[in-house]
Amino acid sequence: MTFALQRRWSLALLLLATSWAHAAPLHALKVDPAEVTVSGVSAGGYMAVQLHVAFSATFKKGAGVIAGGPYHCAEGLLLSATGRCMAHDSPIPVSTLVSTTSNRATAGRIDPVSNLADSKVYLFSGMRDSVVKTAVMDDLQSYYRSFVPAANIAYNKSVDSEHSFVTEDFGSSCSTKAPPYINDCDFDLAGAMLRHLHGPLSARNNGSLSGTFVEFDQTEFVSGHGMAATGWVYVPPSCAAGTVCRLHVALHGCKQNTAELGQQFIRNTGYNRWADSNNMIVLYPQTSQAAVNGCWDWWGYDSARYDEKTGPQMAAVKAMVDRIASGGPAPPSALPAPTGVTASGATTSSMALIWNAVTGAVGYHVYRNGSRVTTPPITATTHTDTGLSPGTTYTWTVTAVDSSGGESLPSAPAGGTTSGAAATCYTSSNFAHVAAGRAYLSWWAVAHAKGSDQRLGFLFTTATLKQTAPGRYVVGTCP
């Protein structure tokens, strides 16, 4: 290796290590132990089943599974994983897997199966799924019926979707099989799943989220084993302030971690909109690029105990849940809140912020409309917030960060409005969008947004379009 290449590698590793060092510790919050659930898609669906079954005393409220299969389906063999557990090219031995589950529970390698008797389970299989066939999910339903009352199991296989996490208003077209594996199918899968698992919920927040996305240090829970250095958690303000909250663990699929997609799975799958208005914390653990295709270990690529309580990835996620649920609200730093926060220098897409230094602070975090926009903490007392919408009013607060990663209380808010004209939004039926020239019809009578080609659905479905430029519309709402 040349000296120049060594130097570049050393610099890259130093920058990576620095970013890890600034990740916040995962704080303890108040969690109702009877309201802890887990869900996942594809490899995350298999991992959700493993966590639900192996830690049924923790996840006794239930699990949601999208494109997954029965517990221990692969029996530690890659060929079984890609064969019967995905393509269903041979029968899945459901009765054997049920016996294995009971035997492991008796031996103490997983929690007692009796915990599953009061669980709720939500299953989803896309009608076009070509990766994990619906027959695999049918076998998962049969498996769960050995432990969970049939009345507690909801199974949706009526959406014409490919292998993906399905949403109402974000992602690729419903029949697409491609990154980010999040498909807009005009169906709120996260909402349907959370309502089944937790019971009646308040209406989701369709506006700007009021909570905070926190990147936390995963290395204190696991080192290596296909796990990333950091994970993410969404915390509504009520939960941060000490309200006893629900907790949901959301597991990405293969090639959906932050190394592959950034924060698309974390931000756009729909969980947070329901969490924001229902006192619900959402934990997003992350695999790393060292994991096979970014997948969770559901066939034994990392450990022979991959689906038992001692499995490294399993134990790590359980430890994260235990940390969040271990006590009171996240302890604020003793540092005072920053003062003198002002916003100025507006452009159509940015705003300059400045504030007074806090003695003892090692850095600062900036929040826009309640969501943090700085990771890791910045050391300066100025920040230019970018990616804003024209003609839109925002509110910013700043916290001081101490040497242990703790944050002060937020500053007094500072408001500002970007220059230019605000975006215009139109909410109507797709028929009206087409008639007004904001959308067009494909040959199979499905409406698509003009300019962006985003799928809206059939003619009499209601959608909101935002005009981002002359002749260009996207699905979304105006701030």
Image (cartoon, helix red, strand yellow):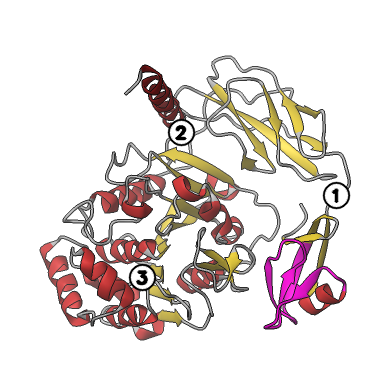
Q: Nearer the viewer, mark 3 or mark 2?
A: 3
Closer to the camera in the image, 324 or 283? 283
Give yes or no for contact between labels 3 and 2 (Cβ–Cβ under 8 Å). no
Q: In the image, which disc is placed on residue 68?
A: 3
State the residue position of label 2: 23
Residue located 66% across and 24% down the image:
338
Q: Quadrant of residue 17?
A: top left
Q: Is residue 293 left or right of residue 414?
A: left
Cα separation between marks 3 and 2: 31 Å
Q: Earlier in the sequence, mark 2 or mark 1?
A: 2
Of helix, strand and loop, which one carries label 1? Answer: loop
Cα separation between marks 3 and 1: 43 Å
Q: Is residue 102 above or below residue 369?
A: below
Q: Is residue 174 above or below residue 210?
A: below
Residue located 82% across and 33% down the image:
346
Closer to the camera in the image, 252 or 181? 181
Closer to the camera in the image, 252 or 241? 252
Q: Which amino acid type is marked by label 2? A: Ala
Range covered by the magenta-colored residues = 436-465
Quadrant in which the N terminus is drawn: top left
Q: Earlier in the sequence, mark 3 or mark 2?
A: 2
